[in-house]
Image (cartoon, rainbow, N blue to C red):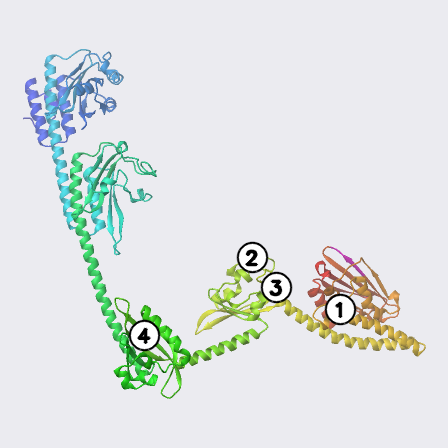
Amino acid sequence: MESNDKSLGERAGTDLLSEQNGIHSLHHRLLELTLQQAPLDNVLTELVEALHAFIGADLACSILIADDQQARLFHGAAVGLSAAYTQAVDGIEVGPVAGSCGTAAFRKEAVLVADIANDPLWVDFRHLILPEGMKACWSNPIIGAEGAVLGSFAIYSPKVGLPDPKLMNFLELVSRTTALILERYAAQTTLSEQKRLLETLDRIGAGVAAELDLDTLVQMVTDAGVELTGAHFGAFFYNVVNESDESYMLYSLSGVDRAAFAGFPMPRNTAIFAPTFDGKGIVRSDDITLDPRYGKNGPNKGMPKGHLPVRSYLSVPVISRSGEVVGGLFFGHPETERFTDHHEFLMDGIANQAATAIDNARLYQTAQREIEVRRSTELELLKTQKDLEAAQERVKLALEAGAIIGTWIWYVPEDVITADERFALAFGLDPADCHEGLPLKEATLSIHPDEVELVETAIGKTLKHGGRYSEEYRVRHADGNYRWVEANGHCQLDAEGQPLRFPGVLIDIEQRKQVEINLKRREADLALLLDATADGFYAVDTEGKTTRCNATFLRMLGFTSEADVIGKELHDIIHHSHVDGSHYPREQCPIYRVAQSGDLAHVDDEVFFRTDGTSFHVEYWVRPVIWEGELQGAVCNIVDSERKRAENARQLLLQELNHRIKNLFSITNGMIQMTARNSTDVKQMANALSGRLMSLARAHDLIATSITTKSSTAGPSRLRTLVETVMEPHVGSRSEALKMSGPEVSIGPSAMTSMALILHELATNAAKYGALSAPDGSVSVTWELSDEALTLSWKEAGGPQVAGAPDREGFGSQLARLSAKGQLGGAIEYIWDPAGVEILLTVAADRVGR
């Protein structure tokens, strides 16, 4: 035997003594390589290379291997042929017209094609081989011991013709040798696969038997199923029972990401799934889409959109020893005919192992829950014991401190109450009788008559329903005085719901009741004080919910009672908009901000809205409410700024009235002196003085009316009339002293009063210091009205020369300026011309008619 260092092809051309010896050596060499388990590709390659040496360098040869279904031939080894050709024929179908090799495999006999260019068997392939320079092809099928087609062996010739008998015998020998090699390797592959399966089964069996965690267990079984069947993916849907004994379905996946199934609901008992979930047996389909049960159930009528493609399908029920179907194993593959009887057999065994392991895991989980419950119960018992010890200690301390003034046990069916000495003293009873026991009626004789019915009703309700009893009432003590007590008990019922025992304690709450009464009295006093204030008041907690308010606040905002606001956030009701109408966000509200931050806030011009939707200007102060160092919320004091301005204006007007009265006296005195100087007799003086005083009185009536009443009364309706009325006392018979020009303008009562005050101030100053203080002095009053404003011009002439603006502004000038800005929405401007002062008064157009 030759050394393994040289290929048979090399040795065939040199060391082999004869063709027969060479074939014999080749045969033994191939068997040797097969027994050594050299890779099949190496063996086949060495075979074709050696054959090429035997048949001649001008010939080519190839070996094609059939698939498991004997439907296609795939490249095994070749020599003398290009890689392009071997790739082109790789995977050709076995058929009646499939070249030499495909046809030989189909017929299971040798196919000898003498002329490829003209033979119909090569109609689909001649364009591939002719460029290779090959013109004839002689192929033998490779048949196994049991008649299965394992592949084909072919020799290609560059010449047209058939092989001689010697070469045909050679081809037959090569085919048989190749069949032995392929069957040997197939057997080795089968043994390796069986070994792998046995190792896998052994590993799975050991793992499943040892695993007690249910989730890990089913994942292990699912992974094993995918590995054993070659499935594209697998799933195990199974039922579990939670701690509340509720059953629901979970699943594990193998071969794909869990996200692939995340959007799909759990499988239902459809025609396809029902046999598995009902435990009726294994379902296997080479193409599930052709199964008559497929697509029978809505809403999808088949594979849901986005579902992984499934053609080959295998499902196995997992049934426990008790006969319960605990779940099902499901496997899928996008190609057809992927699962076999062998796979069914394997998965049936795996399912049985899984069922046993799941039973064990469930038993383990049940045992763990029972252990946990027992442990929890023991801990609860320990806690209860500690609580009882603590309760006994508290009761002892309470008894010693005097908080508990008695204990009792009422045996309801016998109507017997036993009680301690403290209870007897509290109810004015004989301690011996309480120790021996007495009826309920006798034990409760000391209850205040006003509370007897209350106590009897509460006891009756507790006897009916059982459970806790608590009531507060007054009892007459041994000294004859009534004191407040709190009775706390618990009524125990039997299995039929009838009362058995009614133990309880009696607590002295006299001091607490007195504190509550005092608190209620103080609360009432505080509420009375708050309701008596003229300002609005309301408080909020840190979340902005109203906790308190006074009557003025309710009246300001239009609420009918405290129930409309307590516990509610009022920002969106009373504070939702700014003065200009824009939205007022809650987070910008100073009231809520102070309630959360603890700062201070003062706002002098905003609007609040009443419940009817109307608004009014407000000024308010917000202060934090802090109790024991912790912020509790905020309190807000609200002033109606319009009312406040009205009150301030009223005070100003009253001061002005006093001022005007003094001026009247001064003016009257000046008129008397002037009249006296210019009168020739007493009668003339009296007539002139009387007229001037009457004009002055009419002007004063015009001003004083709105000062001394809460609402303006009707005065002159025309601006011209107003100017004449105010100026008449100062002008008198000197008609040339007053000049007026301007359109007809109607003046409302409010505007009339403010303008009368301003004109009266200007006229008085003119009479004292300006143009009207001189005999030839005059005043020109002109006005214009536009869509925006009424503009009035006061211009003096012929009086003393004006030295400039005065050093200080007098009260009358201040009042004129305030009236022009506040009541008339305009302004007043002074121009100190040496020839005479000029004054410009503007009134907002929307204020003229008010």
> Of marks 2 and 4, which one's residue comes earlier in the chain?
4
Q: Which portion, as a residue range, is magenta?
A: 782-786
Which residue ends up furthest to the right in the rendered image?
680
| Label 3 secondary element | strand
Circle number at residue 583: 2
SS at mark 4? strand
Would you name the residue on which mark 4 appears? 489
Report if residue 768 is visible in the image.
Answer: no
Q: Nearer the viewer, mark 3 or mark 1?
A: 3
Residue type pointed to by label 3: Phe
* 223 w.r.t. 472: above or below: above
Instruction: Choose mark 1 or mark 4, whichever is in front.
Output: 4
Please tell me which residue lies in front, 682 or 150.
Answer: 682
Secondary structure mostly seen in magenta is strand
- Lower position in the chain sequence, tag 3 or tag 1: 3
Q: Is residue 670 left or right of residue 438?
A: right
Indicate the secondary structure of the residue bearing disc 2: loop
Q: How far apart in space, not on screen, are marks 2 and 4 (Cα)?
A: 57 Å
Of callouts 1 and 4, the N-terminal one: 4
Write down the residue under mark 1: 757
Would residue 833 appear left or right of 338 to someone viewing this image?
A: right
Contact? badges 1 and 4 (CB < 8 Å): no
Residue 166 visible at all: yes
Q: Earlier in the sequence, mark 4 or mark 3?
A: 4
